[in-house]
Image: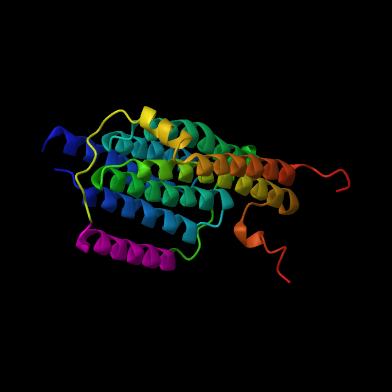
Amino acid sequence: MITLQHYLIVSAALFSLGMLGILTRRNAVNVLMGVELVLNSANLNLVAFSRFGSGNLQGQLFAVFVIVIAAAEVAVALAIVLTLYRLRRTSNLDAADILRG
Amino acid sequence: MNAEAAVFYAFGAITVLSAAVVVLARSLIYSAFALLFTFFGVAGLYVLLGADFLAATQLLIYVGGILVLLLFGVMLTHKLYDLDLRSEVTQFLAGIIVASGLFVIVIFVAVRTQWATGPGRPPSVTTAEVGRLFMGQYLLPFEAASILLLVALMGAAMIVRRRRDA
């Protein structure tokens, strides 16, 4: 019998791995992949609660909005990464110190 | 072990293992292709949860859109002929400690909390119901999301555009 907890554990693993990627990677595109993992884990939680909760669809609707935000986020973030690459010839996040006073 | 459990463990293993490859792979290209399997695994879990519309959306937008965008990001910020597609790793020990600490805390909360589970929703076709909710009760957030998407994509196009005077 697969319960809510099973999905929450998978989602927790996904979240922690995404967090690890965000914390340890220095390449901007790789950090974005970590962010995607974290967003996916949040979505998995929302859908699992929608399935095992009071039985309405609101969790799934919220997950659709999260996917929309993720698409917008990736588009803007990649635009910034490309601009950074054009300025510094690298996509290493440690090189992104242009705004530092 | 019944069929549902078998499918759950299969998709859960695909999801978590390929997510580990995404985070730990040396090469960016390996990470990107492992991310493909993570998205597929999550889509499978959505199907298992009775969210068929969301599973299709996940495949269309994540695999068809976001993953392709990320691959473009890899290609455009690295010289492919140099094969210099390695991604630096820093503070690995501290990252492991923080991430595993978070994992333990979240697992503890997930297992120990008495979740208010209700009757649940038996798996059924959701697309018509989702569409009705989007066009009815959730019309305002739906329109706001469309405006957000438009503004974000226009902003992205503005940011990457080469300026004449630069």
Name the dominant secondary structure of the magenta segment: helix
**Placement of the C terminus of chain A among the 4 image quadrants:** bottom right
Residue at x 47% of width, y 47% of height: A36
Q: Position of residue A61 (x, y in %)?
A: 41, 41
Residue B77 makes an appearance in the image: no
B114 in the magenta segment: yes
Is residue B128 found left or right of A86 in the rendered image? Answer: left
Residue at x 22% of width, y 52% of height: A5
Q: Residue furthest bottom?
A: A101
Residue at x 58% of width, y 39% of height: B146
Residue at x 60% of width, y 41% of height: B149
| Count of marks, rendered view | 0
Q: Position of residue B59 (x, y in %)?
A: 43, 32
Is residue A30 found left or right of B150 in the rendered image? Answer: left
Please provide the residue range marked out in magenta: B93-115
Is residue B1 found left or right of A46 in the rendered image? Answer: left
Q: Quadrant of residue B81?
A: top right
Q: Residue furthest left?
A: B1
A8 in the magenta segment: no
Q: Position of residue A78 (x, y in %)?
A: 62, 45
Residue A7 makes an appearance in the image: yes
**Placement of the N terminus of chain A among the 4 image quadrants:** top left
